[in-house]
Amino acid sequence: MLILYNYWSSVCSQKVRFCLSEKELTFENRHVNLFDFEHWRPDYVKLNPKGVVPALDHDGHIVIESNVIIEYLEDVFPEIKLRPKDAASAAKMRLWIFNSEEIAHPYVNLASYNPRHATRLKKKRYSVEELTAIAATCPNPIIAARFVNRQLNGVSVAEEEAAYGALDYLLGEMELALSPGPWLSGQDYSLADIAMAPYVSRIEVLRRPELVSAARRPRVAEWWQRISERSAFKEAFSLANPDKTDPIQR
Amino acid sequence: MLILYNYWSSVCSQKVRFCLSEKELTFENRHVNLFDFEHWRPDYVKLNPKGVVPALDHDGHIVIESNVIIEYLEDVFPEIKLRPKDAASAAKMRLWIFNSEEIAHPYVNLASYNPRHATRLKKKRYSVEELTAIAATCPNPIIAARFVNRQLNGVSVAEEEAAYGALDYLLGEMELALSPGPWLSGQDYSLADIAMAPYVSRIEVLRRPELVSAARRPRVAEWWQRISERSAFKEAFSLANPDKTDPIQR
């Protein structure tokens, strides 16, 4: 039995849900509300000591970190193959899984940060002292410090510029990697495409969707069109916010 | 034929050399002098468009990113096994490969930064304008911005504190992961141990070696003792600086 602890709009959660859908695996969906800080509560931290989503429970065995989870799913459920057999293509796949984490993840997060977060938190009437106290419940000092910093200082224009610069660079590399394509690891659709999809999906709704436009990056745009038409993509990305509040992306 | 483009004291280079040694693979060692910015020259950037070391050339096929390279070596040269067969242990292995990159790498780099870098660069008599011009040769805007920032602003006390806080957290998790051990992925010595070794080696020579002391972290210290006695470790980590200059770690 598979249980996925995740947040509806988190990119890492989308990545794992997308992989599960491609593999036609059914799972119990447990929503962890990041805006209620459920990911830092003792029950969840027992599953994931890093205090982030998602976490996969497979027959009682816990796997954390989205990139680790998707290779685990490939190891355990290889019937629908998402990892190329030849080593060179597998290395290309892992390079793009790595790039999704090293570059796409932090800079999409930076670029996603906007006043809506602050508004949502203010609606809940947290004072600075309360936010600091909430951060103190986080088991991971890196995540806690980032949370407090973002809440207190927001994102500067320079940071936002650097974030878009980094994403522009990554998408330029992606355009090259998709030649000849058709997929990031070459001939075979793989975990690399699944790993990058949530970030391209997010970039589309940020302030510079032209980064992935057909005019600017024809191969990325065409790849994205093919991804977004997949039924597994539609299934994984259509999860509604069970909170019924405004969609706050994170 | 294997050719490794790398820098003698770079942690990611050490990681790959350690893996090659464990697998008893011979390779041609090509030194890329980071302090002469050879990693940003067009010839090297053709091999590694990210402008970082190492890069592996295997019969003309190029693989970049140390974590990708070590899984590639496992796929291509499986005779000496460094990846557990069972999926749960392989996931533990990948979690620690991931942790080495997500947490150990940036914070060891931050904590490693010290006035010796600036001194070395000053000896070469680079002005701020020249450093900025050098950064402009870097193909990767993330690396270029970090380089300029470190040269101009150094590392603040707060950044250094945060770096040691993050490493303290990671080593705490490592202490837990080594129970029962004996290795990071469990019973089998694996790529996880190889991935973490260069960072523990570096922490030992930084300002807070107590983070990995036997008194504070008995399991980590005992693991480290076992690692450092391996002949492959000695071979991989004993590479001398071919520059014959002061050992500047990076």
Image (cartoon, coloured by chain):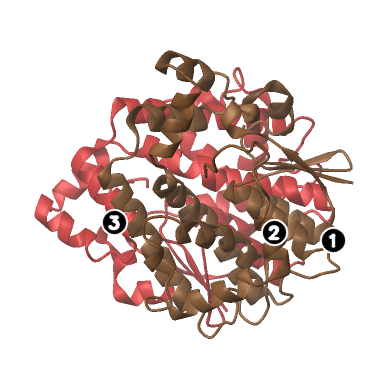
Chain colours: A brown, B red
Q: Is residue B112 above or below residue B54?
A: above
Q: Which mark is residue A77?
A: 1
Give the residue at x 46% y 55%. Answer: A103
> Whole-Å distance between the Cαs marked 1 and 3?
41 Å
What residue is pinned by disc 3?
B144
Q: Which mark is residue B92?
A: none
Whether residue B51 is visible here, answered yes or no, is: no
Q: Earlier in the sequence, mark 2 or mark 1?
A: 2
Chain to which mark 1 belongs: A
Drawn side of residue B127 relative to residue A159, left or right: left
What residue is pinned by disc 2?
A18
Give the residue at x 51% y 32%. Answer: A143
> Whole-Å distance between the Cαs marked 2 and 3?
34 Å
Q: Amino acid at mark 1?
A: Phe
Give the residue at x 68% y 40%. Answer: A242
Chain to which mark 3 belongs: B
Total number of numbered discs in the rendering: 3
> Whole-Å distance between the Cαs marked 2 and 1?
14 Å
The image position of residue A32, as x and y in percent, is 68, 35
Category of crowding for the residue at label 1, using alpha-carbon neighbours closer than 10 angstroms: few (below 14), some (14–19), many (at least 20): some
Q: Amino acid at mark 2?
A: Phe
